[in-house]
Amino acid sequence: MSDAAPIDLAAAPAPFVRWIERYLAHRVGTRGGSEHTQRAYRADLLELAVTLGAIGVDEPERTTPRHLRRYLAALDERGLARTSIQRKLSSVRGFYRHLVREGALEVHPATGLRSARRGRPLPSGLSEGEIESLLFAPDVSTPSGRRDRALLEVMYSAGTRAAETVGLERLDVDFEQMLVRVLGKGRKERLAPLGSHAVRALAAYLDDPERPRPLPGHESAVFLNSRGGRLTTRSLQRIVSGLALRAGIRRHATPHTLRHSFATHLLDRGADLRSVQELLGHAHLVTTQIYTHVSNEHLREAYERAHPRAH
């Protein structure tokens, strides 16, 4: 959805509407402002009222910080531009400041309310069904297809970055322990587990009699191009993008899309954040938290449905 997504402002609860009109009248009397600005404030606040009314908050005096976090989550889910969200939050803060001044509320419920930081946009993860389609997209009747199947299985199984994937050496793979040693950022090493599907695909590729003969200096590389040189990150990008199209995935897909999917699917299925941090090779937990967006929404919905004192 976008800023143009229709919202029935007429559905705003009457107590909210009365307070909104009183606030706007006060605002005109103390600050002035153009008719366009007043319309924008009215629309923002009526949208707030509709959103909160939908979850049972039909009077502004009943608003809590949790309710406003729900409102902010709804704005984020609609995919609004950061500037639009900031403008709406400004309207909301001014409205509740007025309620506090008027004695309708003792505590400002929007204190500390922040929109999600958008300096680092999240990569678009794939669903488990889309991942399944992507993994079976390579034509395994060809040498390059068998390589590509192994590439996808390793990236999704171990959550490796593009550079980590193409940098794998044959000695880094421990088939018996089902582990791969990864050289990450800052040349920091970590051990990443491989699932049985990845182990089988990788073993089949390395034992493939049609696998290209490595060029001098590339004998230890796991993944080779058709000429026998080590695969590059740029080639890996092209491979993933092309296979996504073949799989019918219309969204832009990159190697990092598989890494993001790896992390979110683990979290969706109950893995703890600290373990996912280790698997991804993040030095700081805060870096891993960008991968929890989808999972946190699932948890919030489950909590709201199930907890006896959630409302």
Image (cartoon, grey):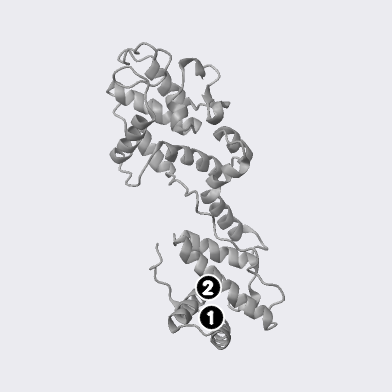
Residue 28 in percent (x, y) is at 53, 86
Q: Which of marks 2 and 1 is nearer the N terminus?
A: 1
Q: Looking at the image, do the residues carrying marks 2 and 1 touch, with CB atoms under 8 Å apart? A: no
Q: Which of marks 2 and 1 is in front?
A: 2
SS assignment at label 1: loop
Residue under circle 1? Answer: 13
Vertically, is 83 above or below 157? below
The residue identified by callout 2 is 48
**Left/right of residue 130 with respect to residue 89 in the rendered view:** left
The quadrant in which the N terminus is found is bottom left
Tell me, for residue 81, which label it has, or none.
none
The quarter in which the C terminus is drawn is bottom right
Residue 214 position by quadrant: top left
Query: Label 1 amino acid?
Result: Pro
Q: How crowded is mark 1: few (under 14 residues within 10 Å), some or many (20 or more)?
A: many
Determine whether 67 is above or below 164 in the image. Answer: below
Circle 2: element type: helix
Please indicate, yes or no, whether residue 52 appears anywhere in the rendered image.
Answer: no
